[in-house]
Amino acid sequence: MWKFLNGSNKKNVDNSVNIEIDMNNIPVHIAVIMDGNGRWAKQRSLPRTLGHKAGVETLKKIVRECSDIGVKYLTVYAFSTENWKRPKDEVSGLMKLLVEYLRNELNELNENNVIIHTIGNIYKLPEPCIDILNKSIEDTKDNTGLVLNLALNYGGRYEILRAVKNILDDYKKGLISDEDIENLNDSRFSDYLYTKGIPDPDVIIRPSGEQRLSNFLLWQCAYSEFWYSNINWPDFSINDLHKAIRDYQNRDRRFGGVNNGEDK
Ligand code: FPP
C-alpha cells in the first residue's frame, strides 16, 4: 500500500505534500534532533524563544502525521544535558513552552491515542514541568498508539554512565550475580538505559544542515539510518518527513551483514 497525500481528503492535509511513501514499510522508531530554531528566529530578527515557539508548531504537525501513518515511536530531542549552558531566559522560555505544549495538547494527544514517555533526568527540570510531565504520562499510559518520547535533560553519555553505575549498584546489592555480569550483553545492557523496552531508532532526522549526533541516543544509534536536510526545524514540513521516510525506505539496511541481512 502506498500513500500519496496530494489531493487526498485527509484531515489537516498539507497541500504541498507530494512524496509517496510505502505504508507497508513505515519506520517503527523515528528520532528527531529539532535543530535550527535559533537560526530561523535570527533570519527574521526575532528572539530565539520565538524560534522555539515556531519549533513547537512543527512538532505538533509531525506528531499528528507520525500518529496517522503508524509510526510507533517518535523520540524528539527537546532539551539536552548541555542546554543548561544557554542564557537563562532561553532555558526558562523552553521550559514554559514544554508546559504550554502539554497543557494545550494533552486532550488532543489523548484523543489520538498518543502515549507520553520521557527519557532523561526530568527531576532536575522546574517543578511545573515535572508536574505536567507526570500528569501527561499518567493520563496517557493506557493509550496504545504512537509513543511520543520526549528527550528532556537527556544526554547519551550520561545515560550510558548511569546504566553502568546502576549495574554496579545492583551487583553490590546482590540483585545481579557474577554470572549475570559475565553474561552481560547488548540486550541486557539496554535494559539499564532510559529507552528500556523501546526499539532502537530506525532513522534519525536532523534538519538545519548540521551533521552530528550531539550526544543523542549514542548507544541506540548503532545501526540507525541518518537523514539530514538544510531546512530549519520550524520550516520542516510533512513533505520533509515523507522525504526522510521515502529515503529510509530506499536504504539497504544490512546491520553489519550482507544482502539485506539474509546472510547475517
Ligand atoms: C535546537 O535549536 C533546539 C533546541 C535546543 C530545543 C528544541 C525545543 C523545542 C522545539 C520546543 C520545546 C519542546 C517541547 C517538547 C515542547 P537551536 O536553538 O540550537 O537552533 P540553532 O542551532 O539555530 O541556534
Image (spheres, grey):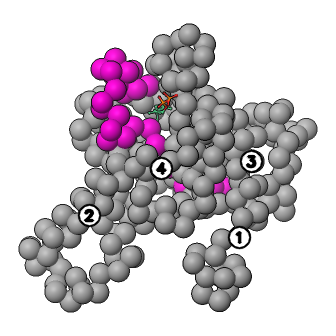
Answer with mark 4 or mark 1, whichever residue precedes in sequence: 4
Q: Which mark is residue 163?
A: 2
Answer with mark 2 or mark 3, whichever residue precedes in sequence: 2
Q: Which mark is residue 118?
A: none
Residue 82 at what x, y percent from top left?
A: 33, 38
Asked whether residue 97 appears in the rendered view, the answer is: yes
Mark-to-mark CA distance, 4 and 1: 21 Å
Q: Amino acid at mark 1?
A: Asp
Image: 219 above or below 178 = above
Mark 3 residue crowding within 10 angstroms, few (<14) / some (14–19) / many (20+): many
Which residue bears the numbered disc 1? 252
Residue 49 among those drawn in magenta = no
Towards the viewer: 212 or 18: 212
Q: Is residue 107 left or right of residue 64?
A: left
Answer with mark 1 or mark 2, whichever residue precedes in sequence: 2
Mark 1 residue crowding within 10 angstroms, few (<14) / some (14–19) / many (20+): few
Towards the viewer: 86 or 212: 212
Mark-to-mark CA distance, 2 and 4: 20 Å
Which residue bears the numbered disc 3? 242
Residue lying at 8% horizontally and 74% vertically, measured from the top left: 172
Q: Amino acid at mark 4?
A: Leu
Mark 2 residue crowding within 10 angstroms, few (<14) / some (14–19) / many (20+): some
Q: Which mark is residue 213?
A: 4
Which residue range is magenta in the image?
70-97
Residue 42 at what x, y percent from top left?
A: 55, 16
Q: How many marks?
A: 4
